[in-house]
Amino acid sequence: MQRDIDQINVIPLVDVMLVLLVIVLTTATFISSGQIPVNLAKAKEVGDRKETPVVITLTADGALFLNDHAIPEGGLPNALATEPRASAVVVRADKVTLLERFVSVVDEIRGLGFQQVSLEVIRL
């Protein structure tokens, strides 16, 4: 009454692969979007960066963050004091942010000596 096994049962393998896929996709979403929720603007053309830039986040309510750390009002010069002036700065601004607030933040960053200031957007 012994039967020879001539097939591999792939159902458990598929189950494990699907669970691993869900885990990878879930963690990749958290890593790529950052910790501070910002609804970014959309653009057709975006640039690619190889180096790790300094990230300034400007939320819809006007709060500023430097690399996911809150910056008090008027504290941007002190927060950027330790960063080299040749490093790239990426500003992540919520799309409902007032243009005047965004321009003042970028102007303050450029006034501190940073020349490579860019805006992070979502590709359409």
Image: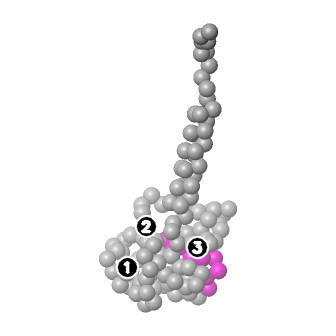
At mark 1, the secondary structure is: loop
Look at label 1 and name its amino acid: Leu
First-in-chain label (2 vs 3): 3
In space, the residues marked 2 and 3 are separated at their CA atoms by 18 Å
Query: Mark number for residue 53?
Result: 2
- Would you say 65 lies left or right of 46 here? left
Q: In which quarter of the image is residue 75?
A: bottom left
Q: What stretch is highlighted in magenta?
A: 89-98
Look at label 2 and name its amino acid: Pro
First-in-chain label (1 vs 3): 3
- Would you say 14 lies left or right of 111 here? right
Magenta stretch: residue 85 in it?
no
Look at label 3 and name its amino acid: Val
121 in relation to 63, above or below:
above
120 in relation to 11, above or below:
below
Q: Mark 3 points at which residue?
A: 38
Residue 42 spot, x, y in % from top left: 65, 68
Q: Report the residue at 56% width, 55% height from top.
A: 26
Residues 9 and 84: in front is 9
First-in-chain label (2 vs 1): 2
Task: Tell me, yes or no, if residue 30 can be seen here.
Answer: yes
Q: Name the residue under label 1.
A: 80
